[in-house]
Image (tube, rainbow, N blue to C red):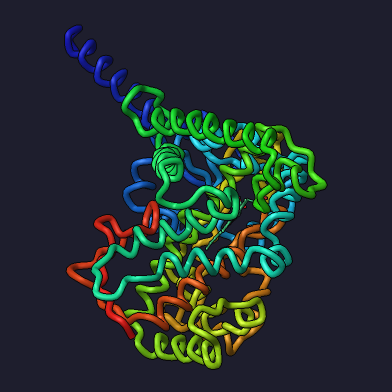
Amino acid sequence: MEDGEIGAYLLVTGLLIFVYTVLKWNDLRYGGKSLPPGTMGLPFFGQTVEFLKQGPDFMKAQRARYGSMFKTHILGSPTIVCMDAEVNKYILMNESKGFVPGYPKAMHNILGQNNIGAVHGSPHKILRGSLLSLISPIMIKESLLPRIDNVIRYLVDGLNGKTIDIQEKTEEMAYLVSFSQIFCNIEPGTSLYNVLKSEFDKLTLGTLSLPINLPGTNYYKGLMSSKNIMKYVSKIIEGRRVASVPPHKDQLNELLGIIDSKYQLSDEDVINQIFTLLYSGYETVSTTTMMVLKYLHDHPKALQELRDEHFRIREGKKPDEGIDWSEYKSMTFTRAVIFEATRLKTVVNGVLRRTIEDVELNGFVIPKGWKIYVYTREINYDPLLYPEPFTFNPWRWLHDKSLESHKYFLLFGGGTRVCPGKEKALVSISLFLHYFVTSYRWEEVGEQKIMNFPRVQAPNGLKIRISSY
Ligand code: HEM
């Protein structure tokens, strides 16, 4: 071989080794024996592109290759994806063994470093206790229900003959139901209400974006909005403290301890709790309500049964008489429809955890600082739990009453962080359905497109034409 040929040969070999090392860098770096199988993808990007492009199909393909616990590198972090129902349950029940929440940085920076989703241990217990003292089923029964009823009536009133985007309407409903409980003296439509709503919309968008802190990015705008909301709320708090008027009976005054509360929170914690109340029940409730209406539209038999249930409740009631707790509890078919739509559309694919020490899990050792994606989506389509899992069949929840208390019922999470807003969500959606289906019929207008991933969403809105029933 000539000198020139040897040089070219070495160059090509060197290049191949370099390319191989770059491609395999993540696998070499994270290739510990004690980790679950899987591939880590490219340096820095990992398998993020495949994950975002294919969504649930990516998860299923990796599971088929590596089993129901596999390692990957997505959204900037080495991650273990767990699709094993038993192991997932274990993680959710055992936060104290080192599995704390692992939500993205953008979320914590915007919603607050001391937000319920960012803290663990005793700060979490205090914030959770304080939230439950505001929105537990007992509070709904004793004080929140009439106000939720009023808000929903206000929103559903006067829609006859109109064509609306039901996605927008259900977003407005989810926001206003929470807002009106927190600030009972700020009416919708006032300039303060509008400013807070528009800042909240930017904040929400910011939490779902990459944390690139440059003017013009959604993340930057989200951070600005978070600061602006804090300023507005601080001013409202000042007013509440000096006001000589009798105290309003609302959640802000409860959080401040102006009316009875056993929780002593700093003003910063109060503002964090307000973010939580507005944020956690926003997209979850609005999307679920929109999807329930979509399924009812597509399944006339279910719609008829739901309508019958609500007309039975209205029998003997005056038109302006609200719904009480026992009437709400009697809406068993409605509850079944809500669960079925939430199951089938899977509004929450799973929850994120982070390890705060090396932890043993199912025979593997997960290093400190890794994310764990407790991926619960596939449980919703398990044919053993839900026969013919892809069929919309709300009756299954009535035939098998144990489904809601089944250990794999994880639509609202599980363990220490099981959703404290579950009943509030169900009441809001049920009341919205009550007034909507007893007042109107509706038909969809134009082509309807629903995206399933990364969020369940109608990208162009979901237009419906409404007429009185
Ligand atoms: C259909 C509606 C809803 C669904 C599907 C839903 C689902 C969930 C899930 C899956 C979790 C567990 C998160 C985790 O383990 O990290 C959760 C937690 C939470 N949810 Fe909901 N949620 C809904 C409505 C609401 C509402 C109306 C509120 C009212 C404020 C709320 C407040 C919260 C809070 C504060 C947490 C965190 C609890 C903690 O960290 O201890 N949710 N939710």
Q: Quadrant of residue 445?
A: bottom left
61 to the left or right of 184:
left
- Residue 286, given in percent of the width and then of the height, sits at 44, 60
Name the residue located 49 percent from the left edge and 54 percent from the top edge.
282
Q: Is residue 47 above or below residue 131?
A: above
Viewer-side residue, 266 vs 250: 250
The C terminus - image quarter? bottom left
Viewer-side residue, 69 vs 127: 127
Name the residue located 36 percent from the left edge and 47 percent from the top edge.
52
Q: Is residue 169 above or below residue 444?
A: above
Viewer-side residue, 236 vs 206: 236
- Residue 178, given in percent of the width and then of the height, sits at 55, 54
| Residue with the most extreme top position | 3
Name the residue located 41 percent from the left edge and 76 percent from the top edge.
436
Q: Quadrant of residue 465?
A: bottom left
| Residue with the most extreme right position | 262
Camera sees residue 349: yes
Viewer-side residue, 228 vs 26: 228
Q: How many marks?
A: 0
- State which image quarter holds ligand 1: bottom right
| Residue with the most extreme front position | 244
Camera sees residue 105: no
- Residue 32, given in percent of the width and then of the height, sits at 59, 35
- Residue 305, given in percent of the width and then of the height, sits at 45, 90
Name the residue located 62 percent from the left edge and 59 percent from the top edge.
421
